[in-house]
Amino acid sequence: MSSSKFRQILGLVLLASLACSTYSCTVASAGDFFGSTTPPSQNIFRYVTGDEPATLDPAMGNGQPEARLYLALYEGLVEYNAKTLAPEPALAERWHINNDSSELTFHLRTTGRWSNGDPIDAYDFVYSIRRALAKKTASPNAYMASYLKYAEAFNQQRVFVRDPKTGQFLLAREFDESLPPEPLSGSPIDREKSEYPADPKDSSPDPDSEFHHQMHMPTRLTLPGDEKARNKRLDANPKLKAAMDGKEFVPVKAEDLGVEAVDRYIVRISLVQPAPFFLGLLAHQVFRLVPQKVVEQYGDQWTRPEHIVTCGPFKMKEWVPYDRLVLVRDPMYWDAATVRLDELRFYPILDNSTVMNMYKVGELDAVFNHAVPNGWLHIMREKKDYMGQAEAAVDYLIMNTTKPPLNNVKVRKAFNLSIDKDGYAAWRRIVKPLTAFTPEGMFPGYKQPKGGAFNPAEARKLLGEAGYPVIENSDGSFSCPSFPVDQVEFIYNSQAANRAVAEWMQAQWKQNLGVTVGLRNMEWKTFLEQRAKLEYKGFARGAWGADYMDPFTFLSVFYTGGDNGTGWLDPHYIEMLDEANRTLDHEKRYDLLAKAEAYLLDNQPIIPLDTPSVNWLKKPYVKGLYPNAASLFPWKYVYIERDQAKWDYGPPNMAAE
Amino acid sequence: MLRFIVRRLLVTVPTILVVISITWVLIKLAPGNFYSGEKRLPPAVEQNIREKYGLDKPWYQQYGKTMWRIVGHLDFGTSLRYEGQSVNSIIKRSLPVSATVGVLAYLLALIVGIVAGSIAALKQNSKWDYTSMALAMLGISVPNFVLAPILVLIFSLTLYWLPPSRWGGFPSRNLILPVLTLAALQMAYIARLTRAGMLEVLRSDYIRTARAKGLSERDVVIRHALRGGLMPVISYTGPALAFLLTGTVVVERIFALPGLGNYFIQASLNRDEPLIIGIVAFIAITLLLMNLLVDIAYAYLDPRVRYQ
């Protein structure tokens, strides 16, 4: 074969492949929807929830893919509303909350059934909580339940201190005056005055019990169970050490936890502090019910398909790891009449392009949040099956406030003010600019404070005041020769999207401050380690998603030290949050939280960037699935609509019904 | 011959132990934990997890326990990431998937590669030779992460002929695209190796002798030339088969196959120590066995190796 012939053939091959790709592009951009809109022939919903679930045990899984599965398999006292995520009745049909949100009494429905037909009662809930908090369970979600009285002490196997002669326990407030006053749940029960607001629908008082009175005693002192740690603690506090004379240590047991089955269908929860957001938190997986008998019989094998017993709208049919998890409608479920799907199929798929391909050819009915790759957004956002509502999450940069030069708040502010967030948001397309730490407009009635907006002149002034004068060059650009650029860098985990963001920030700082911050990408777990241990210098990428629908889920990131990655921990800020949570009036509490947020922003341990949007697709025939702010879906409302007139031609109506 | 095999097998055991030990050290050196995530866990919760999995023990105790479990019981332990799933069961479950795709790709590559390579050698400088070698060049140059999306684009998203991904068992239409993708590179290599090997052998004296004896061209090619010409192919395909069997990360990920390769990459990213060690050990054993098989095949095909 001559070389010219060879060239001809090669040319043809290239032409053919080019034709293929242009053809598919025209197919993709035509039509209102992305790919096939033929509903599945059966009442089956096929979904990718992300990676293979680490576990089907709701106490143990802490990722979003898992959380979505648990909504199908398990139920708690309350469930997320499909649109607003507000708690609504589930296994509990009604409840009472005391005046300072520190004690909650739930009335369970008597029709609750496990998938094996056994009735569900208050003892099941008490067991599930005790198990989730037990040290040997080692649940990563345990801290979610730390608002329960003695939850942390039980989880860490701490001990009470008792006087063997009198049987009296030492009290926490005797040794720590900085503790806030006892909530209503920790004060003696006043028989004359009801601690609960009047309920016109249900005036009969909840039954009293001995345990109830015990919970209402002042909080007991707890010490580490480990002798070494305990002695260290005692050595540090002479008054405490002196009080130990002739006392005995009593381990904190499951029975001491602030949760009680008052009778077969009434559960009372006592909290260690007023927590107005706690009801919303109760829909979290750690509070979902697990079957005692099965868990005790099979140990860590209880979620195997041959053993598992569940309490949600769907039950297990088949589980082939990394291939499929097939759930079917559970006829035993108390609200089975509402469940419209016969089957729910979850495919664990990692590669987003693969997910999109399957959606396009009609092998999936919806894809998970953020499954749409960045490069596809400009096409997908035009489609009528694209979901892009606001998300209860924030993107931000965190700064290591323990190392110079970022230990100077003026420097931190300068870096914040020199970022054009409106320009950034316009470039990112699917985000809204943010100057605060709570997502904008997410919590109705919350007056979110505004942090520093784009102001490069002010930024340069602040940097100058901090001792790093910015010089304007003859060509209009800036430089800051005295700034120690070798002391800062921007770290992020290797992902194309993160790199683009990092480069954007780098360009802003170069342009507006004349400072070139180096970029360093690293593998995910390495990045997490460096960030958590404050081993980085300068800036790191950060993101936070809501655990429950309350501003506190964001503000509490800085409630404890060390684990927020900035090294910033301010007692005044913590006191402000405590005060807000003690406040009974909802509006006043929000005002106090907003004040705390303003204080946080003024200290600038972080640079807020944006409120992201959810970013996924669902076929028009899928109904009852709403793009809510946390992408958690109560599956029982989802169904396949075969009447084209009733399809969704655009995002579904999110107004509460 | 038997002594040769036994000796080789005996060397295998310490090799595997060294591989496992090095892997163990590398995992311990890697920053991060299997439980770390965007939201950092409170220290007390972290401590509970570390105690549950024995990560709070000194390193030599952890190492000793791991090695004893593997050597004494051939048990790789329980995955840290996938609660309650033993590493042995994960390998047992995912190996058939990888092996099915791997063996099919291997057979396809072998058949097409050898036929194309032989034709190219026999008809050297003809259009057959140029076409097959051009295609082989293309197969070697196009990486599978490029080839796979192109195949999906054409056959799934545009023509709607084949499913774009997922495991469908054996036999199923789902297998076609991953097998093609996986076979392409091997096919190309084998074709080029066969051609080179055959060209060399066809010019050698014993082929001339065979022809002079008056043997038919078919006999010359199949009985004499192919046997010698395939030597380089065999030394290449042994290790290649080991890699195909134990799963290929890219293909399994793009086609969402629940194979060993998929688990391997996820285990490393998740810092799932027992699973990483289990899969590494398994791949090492397979690789060493395949190399041994290659040596045996060599000895069988080439008497010179046997008598050395």
Image (cartoon, coloured by chain):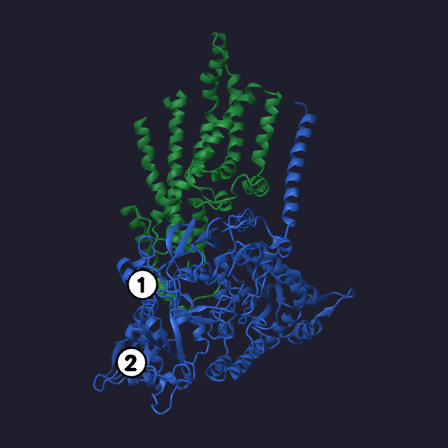
Chain colours: A blue, B green
- Looking at the image, which residue sits at the far right? A474
- Looking at the image, which residue sits at the far left? A165
Looking at the picture, how far across and down is residue B92, in whole percent? 35, 44
- Looking at the image, which residue sits at the far bottom? A192
Can residue B169 be seen at all in this image of the molecule? yes
Give the class, few, some or many, for how many residues have Cα within 10 Å of label 1's Cα (few <14, many ≥20): many
* In the image: residue A503, left or right of residue A478: left
Asked if A21 appears above or below B8 in the picture, the reply is: below
Q: Residue at x 45, y 71 (%)?
A: A88
* In the image: residue B186, left or right of residue A90: right
Q: Residue type at mark 2? A: Phe
Identify the residue position indicated by label 1 in the image. Answer: A291
Quadrant (top left, top right, bottom left, bottom right) of the N terminus of chain A: top right
Looking at the picture, how far across and down is residue A464, in whole percent? 68, 74
Looking at the picture, how far across and down is residue B237, in whole percent? 45, 31
Image mark 1: chain: A
Q: Residue at x 58, y 27 (%)?
A: B132
- Helix, strand or loop for disc 1: loop
User: Are the residues tagged 2 and 1 within 8 Å (C-beta)?
Assistant: no
- Report, in whole angstroms, how far the alpha carbon at label 2 lies from the one at label 1: 24 Å
- Helix, strand or loop for disc 2: helix
Identify the residue position indicated by label 2 in the image. Answer: A211
Looking at the picture, how far across and down is residue A597, in whole percent? 55, 77
Is label 2 on the same chain as label 1?
Answer: yes
Q: Nearer the viewer, residue A583 or B189?
A: A583
Can residue B81 be seen at all in this image of the molecule? no
Q: Residue type at mark 1? A: Pro
Residue A300 has which mark?
none
Q: Could you say which quadrant of the image residue B41 lies in?
A: bottom left
